[in-house]
Image: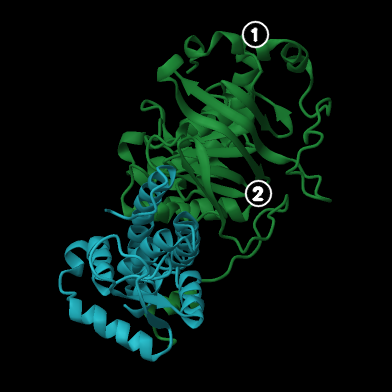
Amino acid sequence: MQDVVLALLAKEPSHGYDLRRRLAAALGPLGEPLNAGQVYVTLTRLEKAGLVVQEREDAPVRGPRRKVYGLTAAGQERVAAWMAEGVGPRADVSEFHLKLVAAAESGLADPLALVRRRRQELMRSLAEAQRAALAHDANSEAGLLLEGIALRLQADLRWLEACARTWSARASRGNGGGDA
Amino acid sequence: MRHDDTRPDDDGVGSGGSGPARRRGAPPGAGTEPAVRRGDPRTRSGRAADPVLRAVGLSRTYGRGESTVWAVDALDLDVPAGQTLAVTGPSGCGKSTLLQLFGGLDRPTDGEVWLGGRRIDHLGEQALARLRRRAVGFVFQAFHLMDELTAAENVELPALLAGASPRAARRRAADLLDRVGLTDRARHLPAKLSGGQRQRVAIARALVNEPLVVLADEPTGNLDSAATHEVLRLFDELRAGGQTLVMVTHDERVAATADRVVSMRDGMLADDTRLDDGVGSGGSGGGPRRSGASSELGALLGWEG
């Protein structure tokens, strides 16, 4: 949660309300339990940790000048690190999904490059699982476990195909991912 | 198998020209053609070994004008000797077309196909048929065994067609059926064999003329998981024996058993991943593989933290 909020601030300073709207759009029904309070609690924690700072909005299009949150230098470093790491098999679907959304939004990383890297890591893990599976009787306990691991990795790889399709279509439309 | 009727007219004129007639007469391996083209940026320093298969700017289109479909689109790919390569991608990505171009079952609209250091895309029909018999072993999803021939006879047939004596063909078939673990099924008709057994017969048949490369199109597509295991174990043995193998599969679990996986999208290579620790496989064939126990699998269980 903290990393995602930070990443969504990388493009430009935002109001808490905008952040929550972006998260809800990216997560769909999975984001429903998320309430405004949680976003503000996260922002407060990030502020205490010196990763974000409150500032006044420059020139609002309309309405009063609101308080917006922006990244500090430390915050920017943390976002860059988060973007570069954790694309391997242990990152779960929603975590990687948010990373792609944040990467596209912030312009800090190319979503397709992240997809490619995760695909390679998953493929290597699957290769290990399959080599081990071929060395075991498929009906043994170990063989059964290896089959389960291989099937899960396969499902992740198939979903990456869908990610590649969607994000390459967005890239060619020049649309960073906003849904406004 | 040919689709000449759909080729753009100018292509036949532009690419026909000089070479094919002369090339056809040249004995295989005569060295009259440069296997590695001058100025090829992908030629690695110091390694002169020819790839067994090479695609250069390879394209295959269907239809013409506005409705032209680029099944394969200006694709470059080298398959070194001894490598097992899996080609994956969604249906319609061009992977099966690529395999047909590699095997001389289809002709490119543009670009070149090289097999064993020899350019094959301009060969005449007869020369191509001869090449397919001797240099390429095919394995298909639907096995394509002759129903009225026994397992052994199915394996012998391509050897006989390639000019082997009946005795030599019988001996080779017996050896290969032993290798695929089907000696006791040699006299069975395909109808009496399980799917996995049929595919193992088809693999033995593909190997009978000691091909430069085995091309397999969805080799496990019709098999249950136990039979898939049988076929993958067999491929692993071939790999260890240095057999060059290219398989097309939509099954990531099958692809993961190869040395290298390329994925295609819209007729182009989208990704190229080495799964064999990235060590060039070269002509010596498969080296020892990492064994099963691994840190990465352990990490999936989450026990190391």
- Residue B102 vs residue A63, the one in the foreground: A63
What kind of element bears circle 2? loop
In the image, is B203 to the left or to the right of B116? left
Q: Amino acid at mark 1?
A: Val
Query: Where B282 sits versus A26, above or below?
Result: above
* Lower sequence index among marks 1 and 2: 1
Chain ID, mark 1:
B
What kind of element bears circle 1? helix
Percent of width and height locating residue A130: 44, 63
Query: Where B79 sits versus B126, above or below?
Result: below
Q: Colour of chain B?
A: green
Percent of width and height locating residue B49: 78, 45
Chain ID, mark 2:
B
- Cα distance between the residues tagged 1 and 2: 37 Å
Percent of width and height locating residue B38: 82, 34
Q: Residues within 10 Å of mark 2 (few under 14, many from 20)?
A: many
Q: Amino acid at mark 2?
A: Gly
In the image, is A141 to the left or to the right of B267? left
User: Residue at (57%, 55%) from the top-left corner?
Assistant: B259
Residue B166 in view (yes/no): no
Q: How many marks?
A: 2
Q: Colour of chain A?
A: cyan
Residue A180 in view (yes/no): yes
Which mark identifies residue B13? Answer: 1
Residue hosting label 2: B82
User: Residue at (31%, 38%) from the top-left corner?
Assistant: B192
User: Residue at (73%, 16%) from the top-left corner?
Assistant: B24
Which mark identifies residue A88? Answer: none
Q: Residues within 10 Å of mark 1 (few under 14, many from 20)?
A: few
Quadrant including the C terminus of chain B: bottom left
